[in-house]
Amino acid sequence: MLGDPLMTARGCIAVITLLSLSACGATGEFDLAAVNPFKVEGEAEQSPDADTSTEYKLMDLIASSSAAVNVDIGFEAAVRAAIETDPAVLAAKSEAEARRAAIKSTAAGKDFNYSATVLGGVEDVTDEIAGVAAILKASRVVFDGGQIDAKIAAETFAAQAAEARVAQIENERGARLAYAWIELERYRALQGLIDSRLGVLDPLLSQLEKVALSGMGDAGQVAAAQRTVSMIRVTQTDVAEKLAQATVAFKNNFGSTPQKTAYGHARVSRAVPKSSPAKLAETAPGLLAEFYGYRAAEANVTAVKSLDNYSVAFEAKAQKPFGNSDYSSDESIGLVLTKKFYTGEQLTSRIESAEAAAKAQADKVRSSYREGERAVLSARQMIDSMDKAIELARSNAQITRDEIEYLRKQLVIGGSTLDSVLSAEARLYDAEAKEISFIAESRKAEVTILATTGKLTAAVGLQ
């Protein structure tokens, strides 16, 4: 019985079946938990001696995500350090590196490719023939209709797009950092301004409280003065809240707040280009990223279309049997021509998909250029408007100071009221606060121009 070939084959099948069932468990059900990629750690029992030191944990990845920059080393140096350690920038650089590596991988398709295959087992169950055979193969593409060249071009343009994206993200992160610094200084200045105003008003407020308690003053004037004081207090609370928010935003970006370093307005302002918005928009990293993406999509169309061509490869092959193998020894060398005559609608649909992707990318280029030009134009208009508004606010502040000086003199002799003095002080704060805010908006517009045109990183010394 043991020598019967049929029984031998049946025995092999029975053994294979038995092993398969035993691998699935006693119940014969497939163990999904063994291959579940979403299984949460801890759901299954683990050996106490299991080594998990090389596993990436979520907490390990996010432990160092918080910003930690010494902002008192100087504005430019602090912004550079924050940009260089930003996770989004690091991720973009890694993506660019991966794209550059992909070029080498694709270009390797033009070189000789070597492979070795070893076959071992039962070649004929009926005749009980078993053995081992080795196959060595070397091949190199001679002609493929330009497919590999098109793929290399696509990968090259994709790498250039990734590098432009790095510059875009660096400038965007730099703008966010500069905005946070400007906002912090804005509300610090407003806080100092209202504190100084209240310091000047404290004697008047004390006088108002005495008049209100005595009941000797005009009730209408006292009520009006109290409303003015209440408005000032509300403004103080609002400024304090916004300063707290600006402080939190700054710490999120840098890790700490500056004690002695100020925003580098002079250097940033000098770096703002004077060319036309249309010319400046052409240098935007975002536009270049979309443009290189379009070139990559075009090259991909060429690569897909080349699939319809024939290909020629030089190939050398050697086959050698060992033991009792029934394979015959075989050596061959020559050219191999390959041509697919029919693939249904697969190739047509792939070409249509690639062309649609290229068209969409072309539209992204136009959209990016339009947005960049509009951003630069709007920022320039903002700067011009803020310059005029700053001058007007300064003029109003000076007029109000002169008015306050006159009203204070009149108050001593009874020619003005306490409410008129308080109202004038409130107007003075409003004029000076507007000047501070106008300056902040103008500086943010300068940052917008530099970030949009990709020149902000150079302005802070990051090349």
Image: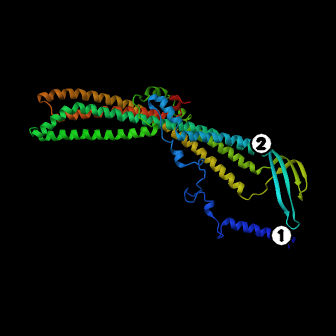
Seen at 77% across and 57% down, the residue is 342
Seen at 18% across and 40% down, the residue is 224
Q: Secondary structure at mark 1?
A: helix
Q: Relative to residue 261, is residue 351 depicted above or below?
A: below
The nearer-to-camera label among 2 and 1 is 1
Residue that sits furthest to the front in the current view: 49
Dot 2 and dot 1 residues touching (CB under 8 Å) = no
Judging depth in this view, the residue of 210 and 68 nearest the camera is 68
Q: Measured from the top left, where is residue 414 in percent x and y?
A: 11, 30
Q: Quadrant of the C terminus?
A: top right
Judging depth in this view, the residue of 77 and 281 nearest the camera is 77
Judging depth in this view, the residue of 66 and 429 nearest the camera is 66
Judging depth in this view, the residue of 29 and 243 nearest the camera is 29
Q: Measured from the top left, where is residue 269 in percent x and y?
A: 45, 28
Q: Which mark is residue 110?
A: 2
Q: Amino acid at mark 1?
A: Thr
Residue 382 located left or right of residue 149: left
Q: Which corner quadrant of the image does residue 189 belong to?
A: top left
Q: Amino acid at mark 2?
A: Lys
Q: Visible in this render: residue 158?
A: no
Q: Measured from the top left, where is residue 290 in percent x and y?
A: 59, 41
Q: Earlier in the sequence, mark 2 or mark 1?
A: 1
Q: Which residue is mark 1?
A: 8
Mark 2 and mark 1: span between their CA atoms?
Answer: 48 Å
Q: Secondary structure at mark 2?
A: helix
Numbered disc total: 2
